[in-house]
Image (spheres, coloured by chain):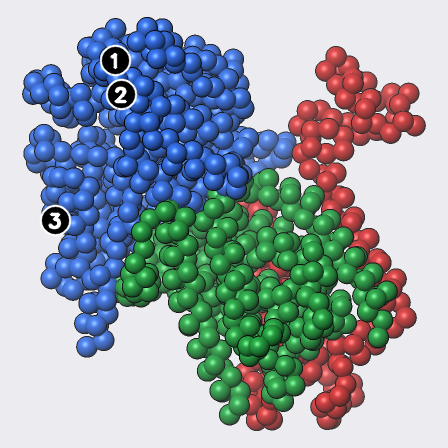
Chain colours: A blue, B green, C red
Amino acid sequence: MVRGWLASLAAGAPPRVFLLEGADPPAPACLLGQNGAVEVVDAPRSATLLVVAGVLPDALLDAARLIHDQVGRPRCTVQWTHPRAPAPPVAAFPVTCTVTGSVDDLVASLIRLQADLVRGALTSEAPILPDVEPAPWRGVGPYGQGGTGMTGGVPYGRPLAETAADRDGLKLDQLAITVGPFFPPFPTGLALELRLQGDLVQHATVHPNPFQVRSLPSSDESGDEAERERDDPFGTALDRPVAIARLEMARARHHLLHLARTLRLHGLDALGRRAMSLRAGLRPGAVAPLCDLRQLLERTRGLAIGTTGAGHLAEATVRNRGLGPIARASGLAEDERVEDPAYTALGFVPVTHDGGDACARWRQRLAEAIQSVQLAARAGEARSGGAGRVEAPRGPLTRESSATASALVLLPSLLEGMEWGDAVATVVSLDLDLRDLPPASTASAGQPTAAVVAA
Amino acid sequence: MRLGLEIAVTGLILVASVYVVAVLDLVLGRLVAAAPLRLAEAVVRPVRRGALLFLQRPPRTERPDQALWILAPALLGAIAAAVLFVMPLGPTELSQSSGMRDVDAGIVYFGALMALVMVAVYLHGWAPNSLFPMVGGYRFVALALSYEMPLALVLIGAALPARSLSIGAIVDAQAGLWNLVRQPLGLPLYLVAALGLTFRGPLNVSDAADLAGGTPAESSGVALLLWALGRNAILVAAAAMGAAGFLGGWRGPALPGPVWMVAKSLALVAVLLGVSHLVGRVRLERFVIVAWAVLIPLALLDVFAAGAVALLAGRP
Amino acid sequence: MTGALADGLFWVMAAGAVITGWRVFRTDSMVRAAYWLMASFVAVAVILILLAAEFLGLVLVLMMAGEMTIMAVFMVMFMMNPAGLNPMTMVHQHRTAIAAGVIAFVGLAGVGAFARFPSAPPPAATHVTADVGHELLGGSMFIFETAGVTLLATMIGSLAVASRRGRFGPADEGSVEPGPPAAAPAAVPESEHAGHAGMERPDGMVP
């Protein structure tokens, strides 16, 4: 009786969702948390629903299975795919339900599914992997303390930590771990192999990019030019002119979404939702709500307090690397749009910020979002593009290179010596997206990160 | 008999206030997000969320310390209950006749319980045998060692005009002038420490998003629910102590004492929650430096000033 | 608190203190050992409170909660056992430990057997905390308080000196303390650190 009453109460609770974002989701997956009807949680344990947005590449399947088994019980998996995506998306995954549609459709399905789960109308998914120790116990001694001394032995396949010099010249234990590929604050697919001392990053290596192949049939083949321009305006602008208003609104939306992710990382979920709802209601020329948000952030110093001084990139480090807003946040006026007569006719002058830290980078992006909204209002019918180079939100995009590829190269040396909190803030502030591959060839797609691993 | 009644009343206050904190947090979050809010939704949502967690089955990690994993949230709740138990809701004479109420060394009592918060959070991070919770636990120790000194010092400052460590006496000593006015440094420093104590907002380093949730990253179901309740409870306890120590406790015109005490505590809860929604997480290393280089000297200044005033002006 | 309730609580806490104290040595992890010890101290603190020594009992909890946490962290740090979760024995140096244990037990039992304990609770009007303060420190209260603040200042000072950006410059950039004048130039390359070293040194020490 009590259980039934609890279940009917719980059926109306906002769904607790853990997100696995793959390639080509119908929309940025973090938009799920936009209106508060769904709670996107940081760890799989307390979620009830696992949402697989887009298509998971094979390289990420093992990690995804592990996370599936960690999701709280009762649980079920929802696949959210693009209507154009090839079916069946994930074969080795127990998908209870597949949704192809907008974010609102997905939210409605999630609410229904969670209600069914807690009422018992839907059975919880069984684990995929066998529940066994990762490695046998191999300690020695009456308490398994290992070997003859206090150290030694390999309990559960994990050797005891070895010491290494730390930044203060002491010898301290080192912890070797891998974070990712589905660590929520990180861009999806990014996995870092780390050696930590306490929560200080001693050494970082980037795993190879799992997104080697584009899964969606390119729109060139499907032939719907209008749809392609809507979904990927910057990719389209490589080949032919696109309305500046469209490009700039897409840029503003991109930056606001990134701001929302940054805010969420720093514990400002409510402000993050505000940034997302501003993104949804964005209109050319309507800068007042954006300026209000900026004023609020500057007055309370709410975001500056955790980002100032984190992940500093000097001018010399970022010069001529094709890093777009990252370079502009270090005070360099590098922008492809300066070369474009269509933009100069609109009176475009790049915004820059001094500082070069994570704080300067979100300020830079918010300022660019405001500038873009203004440009979009002024642009009228003006068009830009077709030159094979375009200033995408993350930085200059060509058929062979993207800003993510350039920024990834900087990552390992940048993270070294940082506290973990700063390291995460820095990774987020670089606005990486491993799916942001140069559209030209899939062969060269994996190259940038592979090069990083070798270095 | 009387003791049993008081325990029951404390329990009732605790449950009610934990729920009110959850609703208040939701309302403030919606305000900051500039999102529409239906009051009915805000009122039932915490209950629904709690019911959902209650129905989740407990998680298993590889060789956790199962007992400590459950005891840590319970300890957090117990600490909050123990603090609320001694909060004076009216004149001292009323509560004098019973044993525990109005502890002779109330400030020390509060300090001792707050030191146990560090134990609760550290063990909550340590028990699941998992990386991110453990880092969260260690981070909290670093944080706690930094905020505890200012916390203790400003509370001593609040006790100086009363010439007593009893919370009831501290409230009585604020009959003419609140400590808020008498010791302008006191409440701001206390609130900073309280943010650390309740690990919220800018000082939420242990349960942070950059640790995939931190100490509760491996928790789900009832254990997670208990932890969330404990967090809210400790917030109420910290706010109540702030109200008693700096805002004159139950003293106020027209309305009865308990109403004033509840109103002042809620006001402080709202301030702390508001700050949590507006100010992001600090960098721990920076905060530790600020705590030792700025907050402790300011707190010492506060104590010295309060002592001088108590010596010169408050001579009985 | 009524007599029967207080008596019951006393026996529960007394048994608890002994059992948790015994668990300290039977557990297999340093973190658990530290917190069993804390539990034992908390039980003793409750007994102190029952004996009307409220202040002493509360201060015991206050100190032990922080102390045991720091002890656990330090033991884990020094024992090269990440998280303290790999099981290990808590008992070493048996002979010394047995001898120390016997001596301590005899000493404390002697106090218990020969000391005169008060037979009645203190009168309601006494201010136990204030009396304990006068009893312990008497006229040296002011000196003691001064020493306390001085110690705190020393602690903060030593932390400041030991930190990376210490008194003698960043700790990892070959900074030297103002030792004998001859040693300094050899340790610090003049080109990089000359201005810095000169600035940081007290005037009397510059050669």
- The answer to whether the residue labelled 2 contacts the one labelled 1, judged by CB atoms less than 8 Å apart, is yes
Whether residue A226 can be seen here:
yes
| Above or below C7: residue B207 | above
Q: Which mark is residue A96?
A: 3
Whether residue A154 can be seen here:
no
**Nearer-N-terminus badge (3/2):** 3
Q: Is residue B209 left or right of residue B189?
A: left
| Mark 2 lies on residue | A245
Residue type for callout 1: Ala
Q: Could you tell me which quadrant the C terminus of chain A lies in?
A: top left
SS label for mark 1: loop
Which of these two is toward me, A298 or A355? A298
Residue at 65% in and 86% down? B93
Label 2 Cα crowd, 10 Å radius (few <14 / some 14-19 / many 20+): many
* Residue B212 image-quadrant placement: top left
Q: Which mark is residue A382?
A: 1
* Residue B222 image-quadrant placement: bottom left
